[in-house]
Amino acid sequence: MKKKIILPMLAVILLNSCKQDEKILNSLSDYNMTMETKGYHLGDKINLPKEVTDNAESIAISFGDKETQSLNIDPKYFTLGDNMVSFNIKLKSGETISQDATINVFAKSPETNLHYTIVKEYPHNPKNFVQGFQLEGNTIFESDGQHGTSQILKYDLGNTNAIVATPQAQDIFSEGATIVGDKVYQLTWQNKKGFIYNKSDLKLIKEFPYPNIIGEGWGLTFDGTNLLLSDGTKNIYFLNPNDPSKVIKTISVAGNNQVFDQLNELEYHDGYLYSNVWQKPIILKINPKTGEVVAKLDLSEIVKINQKGSDDVLNGIAFKGNNMLITGKNWSKIYEISLQ
């Protein structure tokens, strides 16, 4: 008789336990879905539902190989943008339940809006599909894209005739480029490799393979120590110019209420990273230590004048002193603008 009574009781206990676990997980799921859209900011507290906290003995958040029990958006654990995590909850009943979630993190402070005045206009070869753009002295170094016509070239600002140009093979689609000392580094889009040239004559010195984590080459700049590379995602990769096949660190880029991806042509100036966003008439000013977008520059009026087709997008940032030079793919002009 005792066995017949105990077994149904155990079944009831297990059923109630399963229902309770399901209720807790559903509550956590609803909360996470809401916050995935709303997002957090660095320093925010993760306010889990009472259904979860009242039944939990401990709660941990794991990020693959690291874990924290702090329910705060701590930059030691969280990056800007999407963070794929698991909530591991030890219940007061002794059970442990887990649930995967995406935690979106935005910059704490709203970005400011930069304003500009056009100082001067220069001619630009409208045949050039600008992928990389940098000024040194009065010389523009430009990476020109497209299969079959890709090249690296340099010319004097104010003149469209190349001083020297080095063409790429037919299968190469050139991307971002930057100057490092007496060398020029250039990316390719999908060939998983970059090129290094002599700055003086643009003769090829060698090639280098991309780190495995990088799928495509988009933008490239140099901060005085590291190469900074974008690959069309929200990420910026820091590479050692002496060994550009290894990633030193990665940052993700986000503003106060959105994550930015499709980061394209890059320029480093006076402690900040500037980035075009593909197909958008804006330039982002980014803190390279954190990935936070601190300011945005809206160039819609200039883009309207120069964008004749869907490919003719804003894509070219350089600095002439404290003034910025901007251009785009197949544009006939380079603009020198003063920022306010």
Image (cartoon, grey):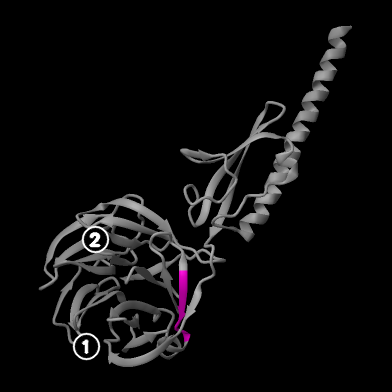
Residue 224 location, x and y as percent? 25, 64
Q: Secondary structure at mark 2?
A: strand
Query: Residue 272, position in %: x, y?
Result: 36, 69
Which residue corresponds to mark 1? Answer: 160
Label 2: how many Cα within 10 Å (few below 14, some 14–19, many 20+): many
Which residue is nearer to you in this view: 297 or 210? 297
- Mark 1, secondary structure of its residue: loop
The crowding category of the residue bearing disc 1, from other C-alpha atoms within 10 Å (few below 14, some 14 to 19, many at least 20), is some
Magenta residues (range) = 294-300
Q: Is residue 278 magenta?
A: no
Residue appearing at x 39%, y 71% in the figure: 275
Q: Is residue 111 left or right of residue 276?
A: right
Q: Position of residue 53 (x, y in %)?
A: 71, 40
Instruction: Identify the image quadrant of the C terminus.
Output: bottom left
In this rendering, does residue 280 appear at all? no
Residue at the spot of label 2:
194
The part of the image, by quadrant, that contains residue 142 is bottom left
Instruction: Please report the residue visible at 80 percent of the width from the left and 19 percent of the height from the top.
Output: 10
Relative to 3, 337 lies left or right: left
Residue type (three-letter) at the residue carrying disc 1: Thr
